[in-house]
Amino acid sequence: MDDKKTADDLKARLSPLEYEVTQCSATEPPFRNAFWNHHESGIYVDVVSGEPLFSSTHKFDSGTGWPSFIQPIEPANVTEHADDAYGMRRTEVRSTGADSHLGHVFPDGPGPTGLRYCINSASLRFVPVSKLAEEGYGKYAALFETSK
């Protein structure tokens, strides 16, 4: 498939903000995005490809205004890249399959990883626990089972 067709396809399927964030490495505003203060149990998948990325079990309030996670649920689905834009050294995170820009990872998170994956809500689609099996993500239900 040629790049023009792919871009047109994505522009038709994604909101303008989702397209700008995932395809052009934009950043959405803090505190004015869908998941910064979202507390429902479930997983977050790539809005472009649907690949599983993060779980609410690894989400924490970083105070930054963006959803933050201590780790991905499928490390192979997230790639890291040096980002020297804006005169600072950061590590960009992208989805492996769709190459969507997700956000950045920083070494200032809580235990046990000490990492903070600071992710744009616009790069994510949330799948609640009640819909995991229905949407093909049933294997992640075990993350939310509590021992009796």
Image (cartoon, rainbow, N blue to C red):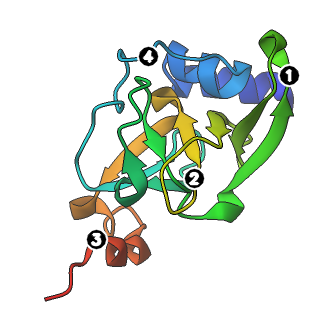
SS at badge 1: loop
SS at badge 3: helix
Residue kind at label 4, given as amino acid type: Pro
Q: Quadrant of residue 144?
A: bottom left
| Residue drawn 86% across the image and 22% down it | 84
Residue 46, percent from left and from top: 55, 44
The residue carrying mark 4 is 30
The mark tally for this picture is 4
Badge 3: few (under 14), some or many (20 or more) residues near its Cα, within 10 Å?
few
Specify which label sits upstream in the sequence, 4 or 3. Answer: 4
| Residue drawn 76% across the image and 36% down it | 91
Badge 2: few (under 14), some or many (20 or more) residues near its Cα, within 10 Å?
few
Task: Give 112 or 142, whichever is nearer the viewer.
Answer: 112
Residue kind at label 2, given as amino acid type: Gly
Task: Verify CB contact (< 8 Å) between mark 4 and mark 1.
Answer: no
Residue kind at label 3, given as amino acid type: Phe
Residue 7, percent from left and from top: 72, 23
Badge 4: few (under 14), some or many (20 or more) residues near its Cα, within 10 Å?
some
What numbered label is drawn on residue 84?
A: 1
The residue carrying mark 2 is 114
| Residue drawn 60% across the image and 47% down it | 49
The C terminus - image quarter: bottom left
Q: Spatial distance from mark 4 to mark 1, Cα to Cα? A: 21 Å
Task: Give 59 or 110, whichever is nearer the viewer.
Answer: 110
The residue carrying mark 3 is 144
Residue kind at label 1, given as amino acid type: Asp
Residue 108 left/right relative to 143: right
Mark 4 or 3: the one toward you: 4
